[in-house]
Every structure is written in structure tokens, then in C-alpha cells.
Image (cartoon, rainbow, N blue to C red):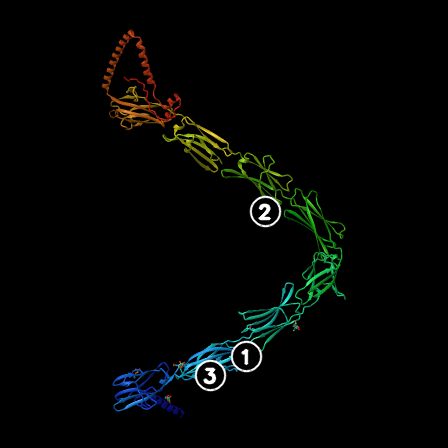
Amino acid sequence: MGCSWLLILGLVLNVAHCLEILGLDGYPNLEVSRNVTAVLGEDAYLSCRYLGDSLIQTAKWKRQGNSKGTAKSLAGFRLGKPFGRDNFSNPESLTNLTVQMKVSSVGVEGEYICEFESDEENFFASVFVSVVARPHIQILVDAETINDTHFQSVSCSAVGGRPTPQISWLVGGLPPSDHFFTVNVTETLHSNGTSTLSSVLRFPTRLQDENSVTCVVQHPTLPQPELTTAEVESYTRPNVTIKAEMVQRGENDSWVVSCVSSGGRPDTDISLALNTTEELHRESDTDSDVQKVSVYLPATEHEGRTVTCVFDHPKFTQKESRVLTLPTFYLSGVQLNSELGNISDDFQATEYLELQEGESDVVIGLEVSGNVPRYNIICSKDDGPLPEGVELVGMSLVVQGPVEHQHAGLYECVVSYHHLEAALRFNVTVKAPVVHSVPPTIGVDLRTEDGRWVIECSAADAVPAANVSWLLPEGVSEDFWFNSTSQNGSHSVRGVLLLPACSPQELTAECVINHPAFEEPENRSIILPLCARPNITISASTEWKDGHKHTKLDCSADSSAPAAAITWHVGNSDDNISHVTEAEVQADGSVSARSSVHFLSSLYAGQNLTCTVQHPSLEAPERRTIHLPVHKAPLLSVSLVQQQDPSPWLAVCRCRGEGVGKNLAWILPENAKSQTSLHSEYEGHMLEARLTYQFPLARHEGQDLSCVYQFENGNTEKKTVHVPRYYITSLRVLNHTTPLKSRYTAQPVVHRLSLHENHHNQKILLRVEGNVPEYNLNCQRSDGSSVPMEGAAMILQSERTDKGLYTCLASFYHHTATVNIQVEVINESEQFALMAMICISTASAILLILVVTICVCCKRNTRKEYKKRESVSALTALMHEPTSPQVKKSAATEKDSKEYAQLVSYSIVIDVKSTV
Ligand SMILES: *[C@@H]1O[C@H](CO)[C@@H](O)[C@H](O)[C@H]1NC(C)=O
Ligand SMILES: *[C@@H]1O[C@H](CO)[C@@H](O)[C@H](O)[C@H]1NC(C)=O
Ligand SMILES: *[C@@H]1O[C@H](CO)[C@@H](O)[C@H](O)[C@H]1NC(C)=O
Ligand SMILES: *[C@@H]1O[C@H](CO)[C@@H](O)[C@H](O)[C@H]1NC(C)=O
Ligand SMILES: *[C@@H]1O[C@H](CO)[C@@H](O)[C@H](O)[C@H]1NC(C)=O
Ligand SMILES: *[C@@H]1O[C@H](CO)[C@@H](O)[C@H](O)[C@H]1NC(C)=O
Ligand SMILES: *[C@@H]1O[C@H](CO)[C@@H](O)[C@H](O)[C@H]1NC(C)=O
């Protein structure tokens, strides 16, 4: 049943809704928007459509006026044309009268009627337009102080709203419920139809803790409530304290009393309730919100005084105060440290302290009871200063060294702080140790240390102390000491004996211990082992440095410690050579001493060097001798090298030797220096230096050349080589020749030579007269072509072509000689005719001469003599043959050197012997 009722109700409601949209509820055939809510300043749409079948003539919107019949058309169709007026737009069509309306003021609110007219009927419907305006929200915070109370007012305004908005507040997310919040709302109506609603939230700042408040505005134009937040000032409660610190200002102690307020906002008002003239010191740290007011109070003057800090802050309901009472100082007394034993009190408040004689490291501690920040302490003994060896260190009396009798007495220590004072008196007694005779424990120990034997003999844990002494062989250099220690009343004596680690003989040391418990002294013997003799080696090595030979001698002595002493001597002299000695301790404890001497080998060449080793294990020093070889002098030699003519000659000076210098020199005329060249090469340390002097033979022929070597020490050695003197006297033709040219002319003599017809390869033999070791021989025809030679023979191949004038030249450097040969060819018949002719003419001539001679001899004697002289002079002219210039020069005085250097033409003297 209930279900069908609900179904029927839903059906009815649905039909009603459909009718409302279609506008069919009151206006048949019209569809119209009913109540329109327009927002001020925006556009609104008024919609009205005719849905019927009638032909519409006119359609328009009208406003329902107050007075009847005065409604005017706002928009519509007239005579088929759309129109819009004031804030209205043109409608769409005759049947669709939808228009846009500008909502410019609240005044547009009201009822509007749409009207359609057809020929038969009019249709109309009314639309109500209501205008709303969206408020804009303003918020501002104001503060005031009334009667010392700070108030803040937050004003929130919703300006120009329609209808009137609603304003509420949120403080910390909740409505302000506390009694101190007041809210005053005022509404103002404006002439333009809107209104402004203002709400003021007011509160005293000190009671409110939130940093912000929120204004909530609700209005139909706002889809949801609008929240606006304003920052407000808030206060924080400070933490307040009082504190006192002790500081030392010069001699005096002062309290610094501080009133501290931290974390408060706004600042705390701090005051110090104190009856003082001291200056207050204020400081505040804005970063950490700490404020501090402090005052220096001299500690002694303010003992037991109360200081009060008074803090005032808006967050406090009333002023808060913190109180501090400064302490009163007291010194109640001084006691001996309870750790010390043997303390006893008597009724006179004097303490007794008993110490054992010989006790060491005694510290008498003092304890002060009181609350003074510091104090002075002065101690005395028997009204005088503290005895020697007793010192006050901090709060303790320290006995340095063993306790002695003089340490006994009445001690007084006074502790003071300003007017406060406390004293302690204590009586120190020193007890003599009790003695029981206890024999010592004897121990002997032998070891080496720093190259010496350390023999230790101990008599330990004896009462009383034992007496230890040494018995030693004579003549031993020893070193010893004793030390004794005491512990728990027993004494230990230790005797230490130091003996050289090495000695040539066996040593025995004896330790003698005497003690009352012994009937006779106890002996302990220690036999020291023999020390090994050093192992000595000597070695030599040489090295070259800067061309000098250096010798290094090493002498080493391996021995037991200590290191052997090594010295060096030359020959039998006592002179020491400076040396470098080093000692090295080997892993097995033996010591290797090594001494080196380093010198230029030449210094001690040929001598003996001795290394002398001294060591405690040797009764006499040991020697090792080494012989240094003699230094060989360099070998100097000179030689001449004749090179292929015409190359210049070489004079070579060689110096060969170990470690020699290169200071070789040829003694030459000044202008010849540049032609020397030095060449040197090493073969190990053997230097071969070669100084070569290149010269034309002519310059030094017949002279001596000297080479000088200068030793390091300035001495010189000289070697000389002789340059031989050469000459060519003549070039002779060994074949039969006849001189052709007159000997009276300046022309050289030409030798005529006849060759037989039809003989091939005929030789003309030549010979060079002189002392040259070799020579060049060249023959030329008159046309300049050269002739083949075979040794000293000129070869003529065929008699036809070979006749003519030949010139032959023999040369050796600047020495030359020439010969001219006229070669003729004779056949047998011509020769015979010629010979016959010569024989006849000779015979007739002799006959004629004979006749003439007889006649002349008979008639003229005087003229005969003259003719004889003439023939003699002709003969001498023949004998004055030009020769090699040297030959001539040696005959003449060797004056003119220019003439000497020049080449001269030579005539050749031929034996004139006719073959006929
Ligand atoms: C339209 O508005 C008028 C005037 O405010 C009101 O009386 C009427 O009830 C409204 N009609 C509807 C359907 O809201
Ligand atoms: C009527 O006119 C309005 C405005 O021009 C338009 O938005 C609307 O669609 C029209 N209605 C019909 C049914 O044509
Ligand atoms: C200020 O305080 C005085 C004295 O308490 C009082 O008489 C006066 O009314 C106060 N004024 C206000 C504005 O509260
Ligand atoms: C109406 O008048 C008030 C006060 O004059 C003004 O603040 C508001 O903006 C006005 N509203 C409009 C829509 O003009
Ligand atoms: C509210 O505010 C108005 C205007 O500021 C003022 O006249 C009135 O006295 C206020 N009321 C209260 C209770 O503060
Ligand atoms: C005040 O002191 C308390 C306790 O010492 C501390 O927890 C607190 O944080 C302090 N407040 C400020 C504002 O310093
Ligand atoms: C403060 O000082 C004055 C004078 O110095 C003295 O008369 C008074 O008793 C003092 N008050 C207190 C509380 O110490």
C-alpha cells in the first residue's frame, strides 16, 4: 500500500515539474523562463517562446509598470523587424523572444511580460527578475591601549552586497567563545540598493594566543563561504630565572647576580630589588629573546644577602619575582687526610703523625672543610720555616727524599680567606727502623755494553746493608761505582765494574762482599775471555780522474770491539798520511774498522806504504806494507812523412803514455803555427797524442824540426827530426845525341838524336842526376802532346810521326830539370853519303889547317897567344852549366832566399861525340 502511494506521489510531482518547464501551467502554448536571478553588473537572459500554431503578427517584452497602461515595449518584433531598447538585445524570431538583458543596476529588478499577438488571439506570460550583488571583502587590524591594556580590533566588511551577507569569525579554527572577545556588527544600506555589513572582533592581546583570526562571509553569490585571514599580534609568556656566578675581579671575589627572562614577547620589564649602589648592567639578545639584567656584588660585603628579581609581563596576571640568597662563607677547619695512618688526637686538638725513618715519597695531605671559593695556606714548623726537603705542593706537604730525624717537630698550617681563618697543628715523630741481621743474596752478572765489560756484583735484601768491593789485577784501567737501595727496611747494594772489552792478557776480577752475617768475606771471581786479534787486510785500487792516476789504499781490521786504530806511513818515515777511517759494528758484535788513503799515484810512486793497526788485543802494533809501482814516463817520438808529390810533407810528433797530457808543441817559425794539428786517442788510460805539422818541403829543407813535450811538473822533453836537403843536377839522355843549337844563345841546348828508319818502339833513355829519392818524369812533343814513358825511357813508336822536338821534365817537389831533344830519322844511303861527305871535308880541312898553321907559325908569333885565350874562354863557358839551384846556392853564399825559392831553367850538358 505504502509503495503505491509513493508511486502515485512521484508521478504527480513529475507531471507538475514538466508543466512548469513548458510553461503550460498558466500560459498555454508558451514556454517561458520563470523567476530569473540576475547578478548586478552581468548579463541575464529572458526567454519566452510561442509553441502554438497561430500565425504571430507582433511579439514584445514589456515591463509591468506600477501605474496601469504605461508599460512600454522593451524588445520584440514589429512589422516583422526585431527591435531592442535600453539594456535589451534584439530577439531571435517572432516566436522565439529570447533576449539578453544587461543588469546595470538594482532598478532592473521587477516583473517582465512577454506578449505574442496573432489575428485571433493574444498570448502573454510574466517573468520576475530579481537582482543580487556580490560583496567584496575588506579586512583590517587596529590596535589601541586603554588603561595599560593592549587591545586589537579586526574589522571585516562585506561591501556592496545584495541581499545582506552573513559574517562570522574563527579563532584557532573555532568560533570565538571566550568572554573577552566582543563582536560588533553594523549594516549600512546604500542608495544603489546594495548594503555593506561590517563585523568588528575585539580582544585584549594578552589573553589571546593565536597569531591570526579568520573572517567568514556567506552570501548567495558565493558558492561557498569566503574565508579571509588577518595576522594579529600575540604575546608569549617568558621563562624567568635568577642566578648567581662567582667571578674574580682583581683581589676580590664578586657575585654576578643575573635576572634572566627568555622567550617572552613583548619584552619583560625586569627590576632588581636590591639595596645597592652598584651599577645595573642590562643586555638583551633579540635573536633568542633573552633579556638579562645583572649586577656585580662584592662577595664579602653581600654575604647572606637576599636578591630579588621582579619581572612584569602582559602575560602575567601579576608581577612575578625570583629570590636568591647569597651564601655566607665559613671555614670550619683543616684536617689531615684520613688516608694517612698513625694519626692520633689528644684533647688539645693536636694531631700526631708518625713517620718511619728512611721512608720515601711521603705526602701529608690536608683537607679543608668550608664553602669558601678559595683560600691561602701557610705552613710552618716549630714557628719557623719548613725544614729542607719538605714543601707545600697544593694542599699537601711533600717530603722529598727519605724521611730524616730533622723532619720531626710541630707543624702548623693556617688556611685563610679574608677574615675567615682555620688552623691545624700536628706533631710529626720520626721512628728509627728496627734492625734484624739478614744476609745478602749474592749475584754476579757479566755482559758487554758500549764496547766494555760490565761486571755487576749485587748483595741484595740484606739487613744491614752489605759492603761490596773489588779486587783487580794491577795496571788495568777500570771504572766502577756502587749504588744502594732500600725497600721495606732491607738494603740492596750493587757494585758495577767497567773493564775494557779487550786486553792482550787474560783478566780476572774479584768481588768481595762483607756482611755482619758472614764470618768471612765472600768472594766471587770472574774470568774475562780473551779478545780475538784483528784480521788485517790491505788492498790497492787505482782510478783515473781528469787524466791523473789516483791510488786508493784500503786497510781494514776486523776485530772485536773496540774498533782498531789504523794509521798510514810512507816508507820508514814516521809521517802520517791523512786518511779516512770508519768503523762499523757487525751483527755478531765484531767491529770492522776501515781506513782509506787516496792520493795522486805519482806522489808515492816507487815507495812502500805501511798501514799500522793498533788494537787492545795486540801488544805491539801490526803492520801491512804495499809497494806502489813506478810511474812510467811518456814515450816521445818524432818522424817525417813524405806524402805523394806535390802534397806537403808531414812532421809527426807522437807522445804515448799513461795519463799524459796533450801539451805537445812544434818549435816553428811563428807564421807556421796554423798548420799543426793535434790528434789524440785513448786506449784505456793510455793516451796516444799526435801533433802533426804540415809543411811544403821547400820551407824546411835541410833544417831540424823539434817537438817539445811539457810534463805536468813543468819539465820538458825535446825530440828533433832532420829534413833532408834534395837536389837534381841534370837530366841526361843516355842515347847518342849531338847538340843542335849554338851554345852562345840564351836558348837551351837541343840534343839531336837520329833514329833509324823502319825500327819500331825505339827507346830514348833518360837519367836524373841528383839525390832525390824519386821523381816525376814527363816528355812532351812540341805540340804539347805527351809521349808514353816506360820508367825512365821515352818510347817512340814510329819514326815517321815521331820526328820533331821533344821536351822532357824531371821533377821532385820544387826541384826540376829539363832536356830538349830533336829527333830525326835517317835512311841508310843518306847516312852513308853524309858520312863520306864529312870524311872528305874533314880531311881537306885538316890539310888546310896544317898548311895555314905552318905559315902562321913561321911569320906571326904574337897573335897566336891571343887566339889560344879565346878558345879557353869558350871552353869555360861550356863548363859553366846551369844546374839545380841548390847546387848553385851551396857554391855561392846562401844570401838571397828569393832567388833560392825560384825555379830556374837548366841547360843540359851533353857529351859531344859524333856517332859518325
Ligand atoms: C517568483 O517570484 C515571486 C516574487 O518574488 C514569488 O512570489 C513567486 O513565488 C516566485 N515563483 C516561483 C515559482 O519561484
Ligand atoms: C531561441 O533564441 C535563443 C537566442 O537567440 C537561442 O539561444 C535559442 O536556441 C532559440 N530557441 C530555439 C528553440 O530556437
Ligand atoms: C580606567 O581605569 C579607571 C580606574 O580603574 C576607571 O575609572 C576607568 O573607567 C577606566 N577606563 C576605561 C576606559 O576602562
Ligand atoms: C553601491 O554603493 C556603494 C556605496 O556607495 C558602493 O560601495 C557599491 O560599490 C555600489 N555598488 C554598485 C554595484 O555600484
Ligand atoms: C558598535 O559600533 C558602533 C559604530 O562603531 C558604535 O557606535 C557602537 O557603540 C558599538 N557597540 C558596541 C557594543 O561596542
Ligand atoms: C621555559 O622553560 C621550560 C622549562 O624549562 C621550557 O620547557 C620552555 O620551553 C621554556 N620556554 C621558553 C619560551 O623558553
Ligand atoms: C637599604 O639601605 C638603607 C640605607 O643604606 C638602609 O637603611 C635599609 O635598611 C636597607 N634595606 C635593606 C632591606 O637592606
Q: Which residue is mark 3?
A: 185
Q: Which residue does the numbered mark 1 point to in the structure image?
A: 147
Left or right: where does residue 327 sit relative to residue 211?
right
Mark 1 or mark 3, which is nearer the start of the sequence? 1
Tell me: 738 left or right of 192: left
The quadrant holding residue 507 is top right
Residue 460 appears in the picture as rendered: no
- Residue 586, numbered circle: 2
Give the answer, above or below, for where 435 lies relative to 574: below
Where is residue 492? Give x, y as percent.
Answer: 71, 54
- CA gap between label 2 and label 3 equals 112 Å
| Residue at point 47%, 32% (across, down) | 709
**Amino acid type shown at disc 2:** Gln
Q: Are marks 1 and 2 in contact (CB under 8 Å)?
A: no
Q: Earlier in the sequence, mark 1 or mark 2?
A: 1
Which image quadrant: the C terminus? top left
Q: Is residue 631 above or below residue 153?
A: above
Whether residue 381 is visible here, answered yes or no, is yes
CB at disc 1 and ligand 3 closer than 8 Å: yes
* 131 vs 477, nearest the viewer: 131
Q: Residue furthest top?
A: 858
Give the class, few, some or many, for how many residues have Cα within 10 Å of label 1's Cα (few <14, many ≥20).
Answer: few
Front tag of 1 and 2:
1
Indicate which disc, 2 or 3, sits on the residue closer to the N terminus. Answer: 3
- Depth check: give the residue in front, 114 or 719: 114
